[in-house]
Structures are given as structure tokens and as C-alpha cells.
């Protein structure tokens, strides 16, 4: 299984990437652990996950080819 992970705002700046493919990660908790190993600076960052363009606050299972976004805090105006 592979998923597409997209980075936005300050998350993209920290990772120096806009997106990447990750293989054999099956849920948000596992992805968060993997990303903190690859990008240690993310440990001190606040962000939320969106799975297929829907923000989620719970751990959820991924399906092959899901699109996962890491979204930094944002404010309306």
C-alpha cells in the first residue's frame, strides 16, 4: 500500500517538500511516528491531518492511494 502525503505552509517549509509517497503505513498514528523519524522538527509542530480532503482528529485506517495532508494551524479573517 502507498499513500500520498502533502505538506502545507510552515510544514512544507520544515520538510522542504510539498509532497511525498510513503509505503506500508496503515493509519494516522503510524504515519505520525514515521514522519517524526524522517523529520524530527515536526515533533515540535502543531498540525492536523486531512484524509482525502476531510480533516480528522482521530486515528483512522488508510486505503491504498489515499491522500493525506498535514495542515498547520490557520485562522479565519
Image (cartoon, rainbow, N blue to C red):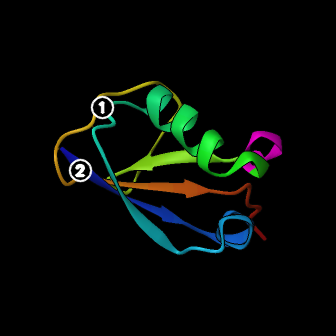
**For residue 36, side relative to residue 44 (left or right):** left
Q: Residues within 10 Å of mark 1 (few under 14, many from 20)?
A: some
- Magenta stretch mostly in which secondary structure? helix
Q: Which residue is mark 2?
A: 2
Q: Name the mark on residue 77.
A: none
Above or below 54: residue 7: below
Above or below 16: residue 53: above
Q: Residue at x 27, y 37 (%)?
A: 62
Which residues, given as a range, are shown in magenta?
42-46
Q: Tell me, yes or no, whether the highlighted magenta stretch contains residue 17.
A: no
Q: Residues within 10 Å of mark 2 (few under 14, many from 20)?
A: some
For mark 2, give the secondary structure: strand
Residue at the extreme front: 38
Q: Which residue is mark 1?
A: 26
**For residue 74, side relative to residue 57 (left or right):** right
Residue 7 rendering spot, x and y as whole percentages: 55, 65
For mark 1, give the secondary structure: loop
User: Label 2 vs label 1: CA separation?
Assistant: 9 Å
Residue 52 rendering spot, x and y as whole percentages: 31, 54
Q: Residue at x 57, y 45 (%)?
A: 35
Tell me which corner region of the image, top left, top right, bottom left or bottom right, holds residue 43. Answer: top right
Q: Residue at x 67, y 52 (%)?
A: 39
Amino acid at each position: 500500500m502507498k499513500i500520498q502525503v502533502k505538506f502545507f505552509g510552515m510544514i512544507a517549509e520544515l520538510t522542504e517538500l510539498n509532497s511525498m509517497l510513503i509505503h506500508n503505513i496503515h493509519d494516522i498514528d503510524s504515519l505520525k511516528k514515521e514522519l517524526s523519524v524522517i523529520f524530527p522538527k515536526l515533533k515540535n509542530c502543531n498540525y492536523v491531518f486531512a484524509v482525502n480532503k476531510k480533516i480528522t482528529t482521530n486515528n483512522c485506517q488508510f486505503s491504498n492511494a489515499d491522500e493525506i495532508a498535514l495542515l498547520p494551524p490557520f485562522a479565519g479573517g
